[in-house]
Image (cartoon, rainbow, N blue to C red):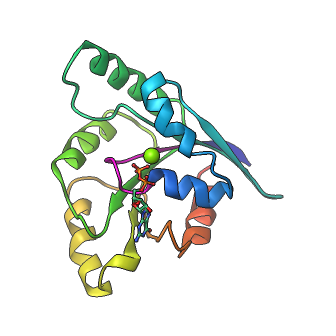
């Protein structure tokens, strides 16, 4: 099985950290530069069972100028080419304005979307459910997976779920 998975989410939710953890290299750090060069950096995760090409997707925010508009349409094109989208959120920060735009964006694609609730190491478990409920009211996510990208908590479960959608 093989396929593409795009990672989207507000700045600082942990997209690069997740990529770094999954890929076991500092490869995603480059994708911060990619935001300025507007190139998409792909990281490839390979096991004997699956191969996933990850795309750290820049440009999904409310465009303020022409270049931003271009990046937004590029990002939309990207999302229509992948097998799966991982929508990362920060469990501690919770719902924010930037999420609203991303969700509107996700509604324009037909690709399955996972809600990946990151930084669970920073919150009380009982606070997770209300947060997840809030997001579930906004979008019909295929899977909802809490993780800590920094500590690697539940990341293997995430990878298992990804494998099912390739
Ligand atoms: P990005 O902008 O979405 O790529 O976010 P980064 O991967 O650069 O992460 C932003 C900050 O959040 C960094 O300081 C990370 O160390 C921190 N971070 C990312 N994931 C986690 C996590 O699971 N737990 C905690 N406590 N911090 C995290
Ligand atoms: Mg990043």
Vertical side of 11 occupied by 157: above or below: below
| In magenta stretch: residue 7 | yes
Say if 133 sits above or below 142 in the image: below
Image: magenta residue range = 5-14
18 on left or right of 51: left
Relative vertical location of residue 17 with respect to residue 146 in this rendering, above or below: above
Q: Is residue 8 left or right of residue 5?
A: left
Q: Nearer the viewer, residue 76 or 119?
A: 119
Q: Is residue 115 left or right of residue 23?
A: left
Q: Residue furthest right?
A: 48
Q: Is residue 83 visible?
A: no
Give the image location of residue 25, x and y in percent: 68, 53
- Is 77 within the magenta? no
Image location of residue 8, percent across then percent down: 41, 45
Q: In percent of the image, x 67 and y 54: which residue is there?
A: 23
Magenta stretch: dominant SS?
Answer: loop
Q: Residue at x 45, y 40 (%)?
A: 111
């Amino acid at each position: 099985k093989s396929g593409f998975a795009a990672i989207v989410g507000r700045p600082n939710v942990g997209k690069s950290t997740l990529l770094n953890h999954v890929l076991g290299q500092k490869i995603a750090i480059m994708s911060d530069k990619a935001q300025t060069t507007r190139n998409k950096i792909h990281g490839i995760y390979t096991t004997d069972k699956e191969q996933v090409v990850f795309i750290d997707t820049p440009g999904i925010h409310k465009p303020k100028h022409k270049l931003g508009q271009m990046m937004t349409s590029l990002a939309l094109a990207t999302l229509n080419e992948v097998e799966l989208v991982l929508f990362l959120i920060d469990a501690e920060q919770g719902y924010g304005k930037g999420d609203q735009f991303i969700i509107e964006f996700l509604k324009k694609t037909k690709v399955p979307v996972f809600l990946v609730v990151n930084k669970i190491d920073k919150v009380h478990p009982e606070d997770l459910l209300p947060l997840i409920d809030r997001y579930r009211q906004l979008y019909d996510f295929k899977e909802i997976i809490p993780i800590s990208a920094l500590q690697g908590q539940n990341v293997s479960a995430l990878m298992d779920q990804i494998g099912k959608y390739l």
